[in-house]
Amino acid sequence: MSNRLAAIADDLSGAAEVAAVLGPDPATVALTLAGVLGHVARSSSDVVLDCDTRALDPSARRAAIAQAALQMRGAGAPVELVKTDSLLRGGVGDVVDGLTDAGARVVVAAALPALGRAVVDGRLLVHGRPVAEAGLHGLEARVVPGPLAAVGRRARSVPLAVVHAGTDAVRDAVVRALDVGDVPVLDARSDEDLDRIASALDGTDCTVVGSGGIAAAVGRRRGARSSDPTAPAPVDPVPVARPDLAGARWPVLLVVGTASAEATSQLEVLAANGVPVVPVPREVLLRAVDRREVDDIDHPAIAAARSALRAGAVAICVEGRHEPVPHLARRLADGLGIVTAAVSGRSALVLTGGETARSVLTRLDITTIVPEGAVEVGCVVSRADDGRRVVTRPGSFGTATNLLDAATFLQAVRDDPSAATSRVEAAMGRVNRKAALR
């Protein structure tokens, strides 16, 4: 009997995050349902589907999730885990409804302690403050206060007291809720809480919806290698000098498709370290989408990006990103994908934002990626099916040096794979220590 675990994610960066922690061997991330079904037919290894539902309208999102769950179950890979946004963006309630339409018994565990995101009494807290006060939603006007509200009238809160009472208490509460048609919504503050939840749900016939936190707990339960944030963190190594990315032998192209404040700081750090940052005008990106190609290939911004990439590394972003236009976000991400395909050659890639990552990989005819490690929690290094390495990461994410660290890693892994692996492990240790101090 196969021990394969099948999962779904609402965007590509989330799918890579899940695949990296399911262990003991990394899962394959597929960008299409056909790709998942083909993988299931020829392999017994884990698989994660990027359903790309974050930007869909509610009815389309619900239908897409139901279709994927039904077809994956029919292929012999029932969906056990669904990754959603840790800030509850992208219609978590629609995802739950779609799974229910497909006949799944759904449990919600939304906490992500590694990034300070806890669920208490069904409400989402970010470093102890209500999510609405965290300032992380950017241009999105609607902030869902917690998974209890996201699920709606069928939700039943399972409080921390029950989670702390142990595995049997959690399992009993979950089963009682499921037996009457409710959706259990589980509180958690720590990775230990999530470990209890994963243990309680192990072997049950249910589908868990949540963040990368519960995915990592499932991975630990399955024996994932070096992913346990409760394990003693390694001592920091002596700092290693960063390579000269501007003059690197191996080209690295960073593509930033988000208007988040975090990304702004990260681009500033890149520029301060000699990596050119090239804003591409909106009209160039939108025209590329309309014409399905870059017709202005000699535009100064594109010429500058190509020249800098030949010299080593470059970041491209949307010009005027400090004054974003939300209704154009998807089209601009598509435009970045077209431009990237036109200039990237065989370069390694750092892709910020799930929509941007998917657009780029689709334009490059990349249909699967397999994670190899992580620069930070959620910032995942994968091998694409065309052989290149790709870093995927969420938009509102990471320390100020995250983009620089990702580019440095991609350079180091070409020069010395073993040294690069050590840097990944050290980075994970630093993140885990920070999480423990919050």
Image (tube, grey):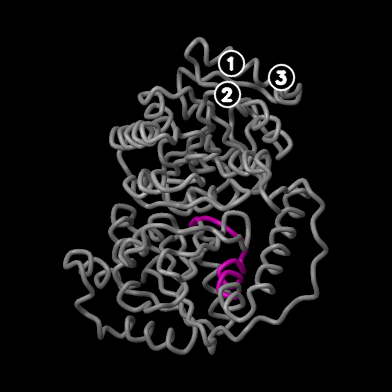
How packed mark 1 is, by other alpha carbons closer than 10 Å (few <14, some 14-19, many 20 or more), is many
Tell which residue pokes out farthest to the left in this image: 291
Say which mark, if any, is on residue 204: 2
**Disc 1 residue type (three-letter):** Val
Marks 1 and 2 in Cβ contact (< 8 Å): yes
Residue that appears at 48% across and 77% down: 252
Secondary-structure class at tag 2: loop
SS state under label 3: helix
* Magenta span includes 31: no
Q: Along the polypeptide, which appears first: circle 1 or circle 2?
A: 1
Q: Is residue 396 magenta?
A: yes
Give the x, y percent position of residue 398: 59, 59
The residue labelled by disc 3 is 168
225 to the left or right of 72: right
Residue toward you, 237 or 383: 383
Determine the CA span between mark 1 and mark 2.
9 Å
Q: Which stretch is magenta?
A: 394-408
Q: Which residue is mark 1?
A: 175
- Residue mark closest to the camera, 1 vs 2: 2
Q: Quadrant of residue 165?
A: top right
Q: Is 433 rendered above or below residue 156?
A: below
Locate residue 122, reporting x and y percent.
59, 27
